[in-house]
Image: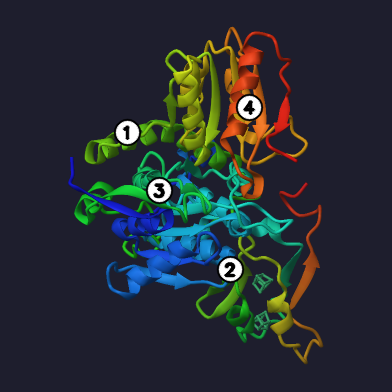
């Protein structure tokens, strides 16, 4: 295991350090709160010669992702960062990046979508992009944000995958709070991510190729989407494999899901991102009082770890899914819908309830989490009728 | 490298090149785009003065020469833009241009 440096800094500073260590050839970005300090730090690293990256300032996120696509098609290792409305503005280009199978790595500092205008955390931005064929990782802490950024490069560039990766961290909560984390040294990271060998580089003049082609009036489009689905399916094992390799150099394990107390839990909360810490804290207190509660944190949302979720949640008496975004008009939030669907094929389906929480950075206080566990214990003994959807902590 | 697409009709989804990248260049010749046309240029040899303006102006290299003489149009690649007909000078002896654009229609071979 490599020697590591313990640092106290923000999630954003760590993501910028990770970007410096993976040595992207090109970073094209547009600043947006709460992502800004990532790109500011990268700009500083470039200006001070700590990394030889071509840093491209653009006039919008649409242009930023377009520049990333061009650079990646040219054969460069490319990284960028955005969030919330910036991610929304990239929408069109997200699909082009994945459709062109370009292994771009992007940090997304989850931010709510307007209106009303809000700069704080929720997952509406990334959940809107969930169908764009980007591999999507979530961090709970600054440490995970750092680790995920480094792993993202290997996952994206893996020849079986060749899809872009979005590495998400919660706006302000994880991006701006000073946290304790371990950093690998530059050489270890450089060795871990390796040299990028592009498949069809436009700048490879010996082997000219044509990119961004019209797929024909005859409808050769479907076939390329089938290829993307197959690549996403292969990504599952690549994510696991890269996680194992990363654990070998860092001592920090990575699983697509991470359970706490799940071995003998009777009820559990499923959660994504920074709130997992709060949920675990409450679970620990309840465990001390003898309640068999568990926490299942999703670290990889795309590809969706159906098998892992199924085996973790099988046999539970009641499950609550916390969604930090809503799918208005649907039965519940996006995570809830997918968890329920993942459990559908089980012989005995546990009751699953949905709590939409923390939209626009609304506080996720411990008593709210306690309330969820208490609802679950009522549902588990049939004392409480499960409410399909609750806006947790709403006035 | 010449990219062999002769059996493309039998390809399954996995056989297509990743990301719709065409892994070679100079292959537009292989692609029959004549069907994009709504009008086709037709040339009267008697009226043509062999000035070669049509050959110079055609954006699709679809005016076929034999030596220094226009002999035909390449209807597999001509898009029917009409530039050749526009540039073709009126021959004073006949009072008309050698090239005329005529509508593509059902009477053409292979069109149903
Ligand atoms: S119609 Fe246009 S494409 Fe066709 S031969 Fe004339 S100039 Fe060329
Ligand atoms: S422009 Fe007209 S006259 Fe001149 S070569 Fe072409 S067809 Fe003949």
The image shows residue B69 at horizontal and vertical percentages of 57, 79
Residue at mark 3 to residue at mark 2: CA–CA distance: 27 Å
Mark 4 or mark 1: name the one nearer the start of the chain.
Answer: 1
Mark 3 or mark 2: name the one nearer the start of the chain.
Answer: 2
Q: Say which quarter of the image contains residue B84.
A: bottom right
The chain letter for the residue carrying disc 2 is A
Front: mark 2 or 4: 4
Label 1's element?
A: loop
Label 4's element?
A: helix
* A22 lies left or right of B55: left
Quadrant assignment for ligand 1:
bottom right
Outermost residue toward the bottom in this view: B92
Mark 1 or mark 3: name the one nearer the start of the chain.
Answer: 3
Q: Name the one closer to the observer, A356 or A287.
A: A287
Q: Marks 4 and 3: in contact by CB < 8 Å?
A: no
The image shows residue B78 at horizontal and vertical percentages of 64, 66
The chain letter for the residue carrying disc 3 is A
Q: Say which quarter of the image contains residue A87.
A: bottom right
Mark 2 or mark 1: name the one nearer the start of the chain.
Answer: 2
Q: Name the one closer to the observer, A122 or A23.
A: A122
**Residue receiving disc 3:** A142
**Residue receiving disc 4:** A371
Q: Residue at x 57, y 57 (%)?
A: A93
């Amino acid at each position: 295991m490599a020697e590591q440096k313990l640092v106290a800094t923000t999630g954003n500073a760590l993501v910028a350090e990770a970007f410096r260590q993976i040595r992207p050839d090109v970073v094209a970005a547009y600043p947006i709160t709460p992502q800004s300090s990532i790109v500011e730090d990268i700009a500083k690293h470039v200006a001070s010669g700590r990394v030889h990256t071509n840093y491209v300032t653009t006039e919008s996120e649409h242009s930023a992702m377009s520049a990333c696509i061009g650079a990646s098609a040219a054969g460069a290792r490319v990284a960028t960062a955005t969030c919330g409305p910036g991610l929304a503005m990239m929408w069109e280009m997200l699909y082009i990046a994945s459709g062109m199978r370009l292994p771009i790595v992007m940090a997304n500092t989850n931010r709510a979508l307007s209106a009303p205008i809000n700069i704080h955390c929720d997952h509406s931005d990334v959940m809107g992009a969930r169908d764009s064929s980007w591999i999507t990782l979530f961090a709970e802490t600054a440490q995970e944000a750092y680790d995920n950024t480094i792993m993202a490069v290997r996952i994206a560039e893996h020849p079986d995958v060749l899809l872009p990766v979005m590495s998400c961290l919660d706006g302000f909560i994880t991006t701006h709070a000073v946290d304790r984390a371990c950093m690998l040294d530059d050489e270890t990271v450089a060795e871990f991510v390796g040299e990028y060998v592009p498949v069809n580089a436009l700048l490879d003049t010996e082997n000219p190729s044509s990119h961004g082609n019209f797929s024909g009036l005859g409808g050769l489009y479907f076939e390329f989407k089938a290829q993307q689905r197959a690549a996403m399916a292969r990504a599952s094992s690549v994510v696991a494999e890269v996680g194992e390799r990363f654990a070998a150099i860092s001592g920090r394990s990575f699983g697509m899901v991470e359970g706490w107390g799940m071995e003998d839990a009777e009820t559990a909360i499923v959660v994504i991102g920074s709130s997992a810490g709060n949920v675990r804290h409450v679970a620990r207190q309840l465990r001390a009082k003898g309640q068999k509660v568990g926490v299942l944190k999703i670290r990889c949302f795309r590809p969706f770890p159906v098998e892992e979720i199924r085996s973790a949640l099988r046999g539970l008496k009641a499950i609550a899914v916390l969604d930090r975004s809503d799918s208005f008009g649907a039965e519940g939030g996006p995570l809830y819908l997918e968890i329920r669907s993942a459990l559908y094929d089980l012989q005995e389906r546990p009751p699953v309830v949905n709590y939409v929480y923390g939209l626009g950075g609304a506080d996720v206080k411990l008593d709210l989490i306690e309330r969820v566990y208490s609802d679950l214990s009522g549902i588990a003994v049939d004392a409480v009728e499960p409410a399909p959807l609750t806006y947790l902590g709403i006035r | 490298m010449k990219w062999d697409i002769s059996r493309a009709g039998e390809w399954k989804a996995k056989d297509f090149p990743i990301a719709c990248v065409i892994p070679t260049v100079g292959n537009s010749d292989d692609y029959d785009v004549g069907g994009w046309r709504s009008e086709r240029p037709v040339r009267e040899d008697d009226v043509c003065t062999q000035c070669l303006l049509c050959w110079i102006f055609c954006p699709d290299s679809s005016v076929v020469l034999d030596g220094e003489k226009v002999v035909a149009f390449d209807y597999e690649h001509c898009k029917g833009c009409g530039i050749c007909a526009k540039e073709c000078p009126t021959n004073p002896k006949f009072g008309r241009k050698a090239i005329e654009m005529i509508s593509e229609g059902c009477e053409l071979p292979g069109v149903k």
